[in-house]
Amino acid sequence: MTRAQAGLLLAAPALVVIAVFFFLPVLAALALSLTDFDLYALADSGYLRFVGLRNYVQLLGNPLFWQALGNTLYFTVVGVPLSLAVSVGTAVLVHSRLARCRGLFRTALFAPVVTTVVAVAVIWRYLLHTRYGLINYGLGKLGFAPIDWLGDPHFAMPAIILFAVWKNFGYNMVIVLAALQNIPEDLYEAAELDGAGAGQQFLRITLPMLGPTLLFVSIMTVAGYFQLFAEPYVMTLGGPGQSTLSVLYLLYEEGFKWWNLGRASAVAFVLFLMMFAATALQMRLGRQAAA
């Protein structure tokens, strides 16, 4: 037995598991998106019909889908840079020589990541309450009028973005912090001898050295933010006025509220194509920046 054959034999169990629990369901969902599979077809397969691309055509002609797509893009375009900026900023602060008890800071800042989304979303819903919320109480003490954070279409999505950034930035912070610890201190010492200040060191040394790490965390964050669901489901139910309806929330309603599983599968594959295109664009921009 050759070395390659031995490696393939050892990897075979994992490959079988991936094929059974990932590739086969994906192919089944793709086939499902080409049918009109619904609640009636669950009871009697005779109601199942092949409709080709009709689900996709109807989806692209649905104004609600375009609103959900716009909301998802808004959440991603605003939330991802904000999350990355907070992650890098906190990682730099924790890594700095001024920070003591780094382990305590890492634990405290990473804690929101491991908490249950539903539980903390309920807490944030109370914090954002118009009359009794702590945030509006603080604004009132500063002389500002209370804001209907989750009931006003202009503030609902920004409120969800702030919650998502608070919930998720700790994961990227830990990764960026690990990358910061791998940057040689000699580079900073040489730059300091040449008269470079802290800002120049950050722009000329820290950011370029963090390039591959930032590309990785940006791809992961974009993929995660495209899958916006739990936050609007718990906090706003997609409202007010569909202002927080996301593509994944639309998929949930099509599949598990109206039982249009064929149409829901079409939504899933459109979302997959969006995420694939965003990832390919980020990879291309990352290669250009590295060159």
Image (cartoon, rainbow, N blue to C red):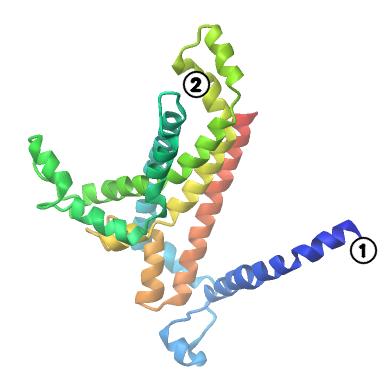
Which quadrant of the figure has residue 60?
bottom left
The N terminus - image quarter: bottom right
Task: Look at the numbered disc 1 and give the secondary structure of its residue.
Answer: loop
Farthest-out residue, right: 1
Number of marks in the rendered image? 2
Q: Residues within 10 Å of mark 1 (few under 14, many from 20)?
A: few
Q: Amino acid at mark 2?
A: Leu
In this rendering, position of residue 253 left or right of residue 239:
right
Q: Position of residue 262 (x, y in %)?
A: 48, 75
Task: Look at the numbered disc 2 and give the secondary structure of its residue.
Answer: helix
Residue 21 visible to an observer of this rendering:
yes
Which quadrant of the figure has residue 139?
top left
Q: Position of residue 56 (x, y in %)?
A: 48, 67
| Above or below for 200 versus 82 | above
Which quadrant of the figure has residue 187?
top right
In this rendering, position of residue 151 left or right of residue 120:
left
User: What residue is drawn where x is 44% and y is 82%?
Assistant: 38
Viewer-side residue, 216 vs 107: 107
In this rendering, position of residue 221 left or right of residue 65:
right
Q: Position of residue 256 (x, y in %)?
A: 38, 75
User: What residue is drawn where x is 34% and y is 75%?
Assistant: 257
Residue under label 2:
203
User: Mark number for residue 1?
Assistant: 1
Distance, label 1 to label 2, CA atoms, is 52 Å
Decide: marks 1, 2 in contact (CB < 8 A)?
Answer: no
Is label 1 or label 2 in front?
Answer: 1
Viewer-side residue, 22 vs 189: 189
| Above or below for 60 versus 73 | below
In this rendering, position of residue 57 left or right of residue 82:
right
Q: Residues within 10 Å of mark 2 (few under 14, many from 20)?
A: few
